[in-house]
Image (cartoon, helix red, strand yellow):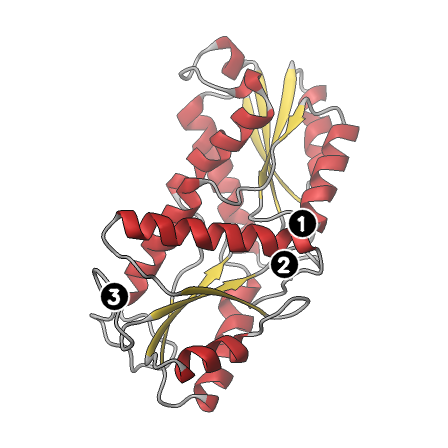
Amino acid sequence: MAHGSSDPRAASAIADLIALARARAELRGRPGLDARAAFLGHAAPALPQVLAALHGGGRRRVVVLPLLLTAAYHSGTDIPGALLEAQAAFPRLSIAYGEPLGPHPALLHALERRLAEADAGADGGAAGDHRVSSTAVVLAAAGSSRPAANAAVAQMAADWQGARGWRAVLPAYASAASPTPGQAVAALLRDGAQRVVVASYLLAPGLFADRIRDASLAAGAAAVSRPLGTAPEVADVLLQRYTEACATGACATGACDAGACATGAQPSGSPGLVLATRASARPAS
């Protein structure tokens, strides 16, 4: 619902994440979760198309989740604005609005999973293990014009360093803020880090992921992880945000049923789930 991407890898990654979330919901006794993706631009379908299909299929309650890793401009402005327009078009549809995926402690585990895939030297070991304590990490996010969103990434970096004992964890941003990933890698190497690895705090492949990888490797990074995508922790956070939105009645319209989250098979009156995504076709607002 924020941007979408003209890069087909992004839409494919979102589709895979949705499929994983459905599968994990079924394992938890919630089969048949109706989860669909919507995009603000650069990719189809748009939110009105998805809501029209849900409404026409008999849905009366919908939870919209922003697939964003920070509470950036899109989650606080763009998506709520689109939801108000959607509510006017579908007045009998109760629309709840959930929280962004991040920040969330489980996403640190997902980042570690991706780093381990990219670089064996970053895998395993408790805090103080030489492989960990001699390695510096760049936590590379998309970046936002909203300072609070960038501050959340910086706080995640500090939390990760404290929990794992890396030599350092430095936040970096692919757009809208500094340092850039390349600048962060160069700074850590100048500071004496033996190795620097870069954790891509992104959901899907695309322009930002390519930019982070290329700039980081050019600056001397030993490895760059791929976006979080279908890490199981991401799917679990998605399901948690869905449950929270239902339980709290976090409604875009004020008409949400706080008991809307069904346990077990979902009949036509129980809520669908629309995943509003921002992929990386443009710099983050």
Please state which amino acid type lies under the numbered disc 3.
Answer: Cys
Please state which amino acid type lies under the numbered disc 2.
Answer: Ser
Residue density around tag 3, few if under 14, some if 14–19, many if 20 or more, within 10 Å:
many
Percent coordinates x, y for residue 249 in the rendering: 27, 71
Q: State how far apart marks 1 and 2 are (Cα).
A: 7 Å
Percent coordinates x, y for residue 188 in the rendering: 66, 24
Tell me the SS state at disc 2.
loop
Please state which amino acid type lies under the numbered disc 1.
Answer: Ala
Q: Is the residue under label 2 in contact with that under label 1 (CB below 8 Å)?
A: yes
Mark found first going from the N terminus, 3 or 1: 1
Q: Quadrant of residue 95?
A: bottom left
Please name the residue that numbered disc 2 is placed on: 145
Please name the residue that numbered disc 3 is placed on: 261
Please report the residue visible at 34 percent of the width from the left and 61 percent of the height from the top.
Answer: 33
Tell me the SS state at disc 1.
loop
Q: State how far apart marks 3 and 1 are (Cα).
A: 38 Å
Percent coordinates x, y for residue 242 in the rendering: 34, 60
Image height of 131 relative to 249, above or below? above
Please report the residue visible at 42 percent of the width from the left and 48 percent of the height from the top.
Answer: 20
Report if residue 251 is visible in the image: yes
**Horizontal side of residue 1 vs 273, given as left or right:** right
Please name the residue that numbered disc 1 is placed on: 177
Quadrant into which the N terminus falls: bottom right
